[in-house]
Image (cartoon, rainbow, N blue to C red):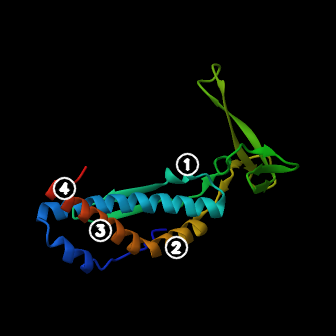
């Protein structure tokens, strides 16, 4: 799904202050502002989704990327595809009755399968286990159990997007002030 959440900012207040700066200084301040805002969005989205879904932030941050464009715009990409069930908890998955429990999520009818690496005859246990389940009533086929987090991820991103304008203006003010201080020789 390629739905987009677009945030547009009226930077007229900041531009008044920025008129005091040279074009190069304005460009540097704006690029740093975009980069820092992108990092902020990435961390805030990971925190919000983690709080709602109990998925570790480490797993979520690997699925959130920030791209800075040469035309002074930025873009956040979030991979909302389902996650493998064994990755969604802080601890390990464990058998629980007739299924597997991973964090606060229970997957009835699932089991843990050890992962082996290497060629046939030279296989060795990797120490990892994945959560599997049967499709249908017969013994085969089987598939990995996946955890769908698209709805909560999208909702959390929309909540963060509401706060982006305010945060962008705070960072822009800081960066413009830094460029001014640098120009008069007071910057560290």
The secondary structure type at the circle numbered 4 is helix
Say which of marks 2 and 4 sits in front: 4
Relative placement, left or right, of 138 versus 68 is right
The residue tagged with tag 2: helix, strand or loop?
helix
Q: Position of residue 139 (x, y in %)?
A: 79, 46
Q: Which of marks 3 and 1 precedes in the sequence?
A: 1
**Circle number at residue 159:** 2
Marks 3 and 4: CB-CB under 8 Å? no
Toward the top, the furthest residue is 122
Q: What whole-number distance in Å separates the C-alpha atoms at marks 1 and 3?
A: 30 Å
Number of other residues with Cα within 10 Å of mark 1, as a class: few under 14, some 14 to 19, many 20 or more: few
Q: Residue at x 30, y 80 (%)?
A: 10
Q: CA distance from mark 2 to mark 3?
A: 23 Å
Residue hosting label 1: 58
Of the pair 39 and 170, the residue shown nearer to us = 170
Mark 3 Cα within 10 Å, few/some/many (few <14, many 20+)?
some
| Of the image marks 1 and 2, the number of the one nearer the N terminus | 1
129, above or below 125, in the image:
below
Which-is-in-front pick, marks 2 and 3?
A: 3
Residue drawn at x 55%, y 48% is 58
Q: Mark 3: which secondary structure?
A: helix
Q: Which mark is residue 182?
A: 4
Q: CA distance from mark 1 to mark 4?
A: 36 Å
| Residue that sits furthest to the left in the current view | 22
Residue named by callout 3 = 173
Decide which of tag 2 and tag 4 comes sooner along the chain: 2
The relative height of residue 10 versus residue 97 in the rendered view (above or below) is below
């Amino acid at each position: 799904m390629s739905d987009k959440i677009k945030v547009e900012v009226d930077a007229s207040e900041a531009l008044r202050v920025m008129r005091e700066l040279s074009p190069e200084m304005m460009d540097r301040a704006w690029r740093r502002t975009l980069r820092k805002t992108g990092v902020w969005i990435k961390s805030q989205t990971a925190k919000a989704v983690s709080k709602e879904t109990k998925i570790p932030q480490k797993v979520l941050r690997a699925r959130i990327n920030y791209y800075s464009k040469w035309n002074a715009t930025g873009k956040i990409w979030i991979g909302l595809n389902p996650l493998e069930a064994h990755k969604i908890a802080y601890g390990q998955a464990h058998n629980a009755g007739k299924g597997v429990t991973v964090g606060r999520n229970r997957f009835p009818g699932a089991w843990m399968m050890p992962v082996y690496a290497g060629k046939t005859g030279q296989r060795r246990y990797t120490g990892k286990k994945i959560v599997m389940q049967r499709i249908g009533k017969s013994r085969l086929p089987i598939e990995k159990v996946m955890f769908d987090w698209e709805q909560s991820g999208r909702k959390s991103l929309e909540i963060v997007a509401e706060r982006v304008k305010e945060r962008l203006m705070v960072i822009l003010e800081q960066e413009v002030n830094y460029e001014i201080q640098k120009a008069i020789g007071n910057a560290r």
